Amino acid sequence: MSTDTSSPNSELSDKYAHNARGEWRPDYPIKHAPLLQWSVRFKAIAKWFFGWPGYLWPQNISYLTITLTVWFLTQPDITRCVTFEADWMLQILSRNMVLMWLFYGGLYYYLYIRKAEGTKTKFDAKWPTRNSRVFLFRDQVKDNIFWTCGVAGLIWTGYEVLTLWLYANHYIPWLLWSEHPVYFVLWFLMIPIWRDFHFYWIHRLSHWKPLYKNVHYLHHKNINPNPWSGMAMHPVETLLYLSVVAIHWIVPSHPLHALFTMQHAVMGAAHGHHGFEGPLVKGKIPSSSYFHYLHHRYFESNYGGSTLPLDQWFGTFREGLPEGEGSKLAEEQVI
């Protein structure tokens, strides 16, 4: 049997066979982390927290490493942020554009241009849509890049600029490492959990009919998402999504916490939409976007992430993609 998986028509093993719609799903159901489950399992929680893959490794530690690198190499001194000046604001904008192209573009290059993983574990064997009037420029990727870099990147920068200005002028409470080292570290551990909580409720709000019809519909054009789809949103939705940073305007924290929150949100969006099941890169790096792919496929499920069991608690959880099932809304919007 051929092992070539570079196209949807390749012969695949049963393990990686796509159905008649060109869809593939893992042979195991997705599940939430053992945190906050009704039956407390301390051993399972410890394994999830410290294990590979788990809460710390590799995703959250990787995002934190990027944030720390960015902070020490490119962050403008807080004293420059007392007034809105073009130099430091453009410094942040330039940095954010570079980060987007490196992270989003890197994932897209590896998975969609090099096609290094083929379609073996790609949830939808089709590649991004071209020559379709549904998307700007009649091209899904160009459309996604426009909304991601041309719009979301500006809003992301705007939130960062405003937050730094608030810190610099002491309009919001500071948290110093020297005074509260334990709380300082705990904040970093809590930020991904806060992100999950915020995303679930903001996402459910986006599916309120008036907001969906006028705002969130734009993101859901991407039934077959790719890394650039992560922040391909209407400006109103981007404002809502990135409002996750506003907690730092109220709860004592450090500008580094705010930076981590923003970068976690932006990089997490690319990770959640890349369209593949890991482990990637010769089976070495755990990575999956199946939880959120199911939301793009079925629309009314999996609003949050896998850390907090909010979808379970509120009856919106879908654990897998059964053969032959579909969403009427998804069917109507298939391109």
Image: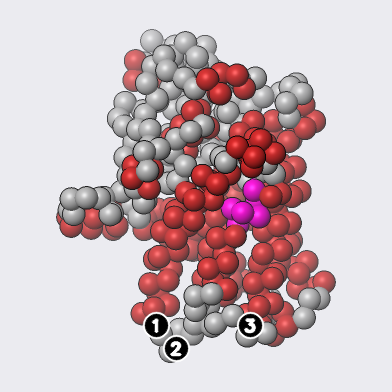
Marks 2 and 3: which is nearer the front? 3
Q: Can residue 160 be spotted in the picture? A: yes
Classify mark 1: residues with Cα within 10 Å, few (<14), some (14-19) or many (20+).
few
Kind of residue indicated by mark 3 = Tyr
Q: Could you give the CA–CA distance between mark 2 and mark 1, rounded to whole angstroms?
A: 6 Å
When the figure is inspected, residue 43 is found, relative to residue 186, above or below; the finding is above
Q: Quadrant of residue 219?
A: top right
Q: Residue drawn 39% across and 66% down? A: 189
Separation of residues labelled 1 and 3 (CA atoms):
22 Å
Q: Which mark is residue 20?
A: none
- Residue located beneath label 3 in the image: 171
Whether 183 is drawn above or below 7: the answer is: below
Q: Amino acid at mark 2?
A: Ser
Which three-letter amino acid code belongs to the residue tagged 1? Pro
Secondary structure under tag 2 reads: loop
Crowding at mark 2 (Cα within 10 Å: few <14, some 14-19, many 20+):
few
Which label's residue is closer to the chain start, 1 or 3? 3
Q: Residue at x 52, y 11 (%)?
A: 9
Return the residue at label 2: 178
Q: Residue at x 64, y 31 (%)?
A: 221
Q: CA distance from mark 2 to mark 3?
A: 20 Å
Question: Horizontal placement of 36 versus 100: left or right?
Answer: left
Residue 132 place in picture, x, y as percent: 74, 22
Instruction: Give the residues drawn in magenta, as a range.
Output: 237-242
Q: Classify residue 113 by image quadrant.
A: top right
Rendered image: mark on residue 181? 1
Q: Quadrant of the N terminus?
A: top left
Q: Residue 60: give x, y in percent of width and height.
A: 43, 57
Examine the rendering and report whether any part of residue 280 can be seen.
no
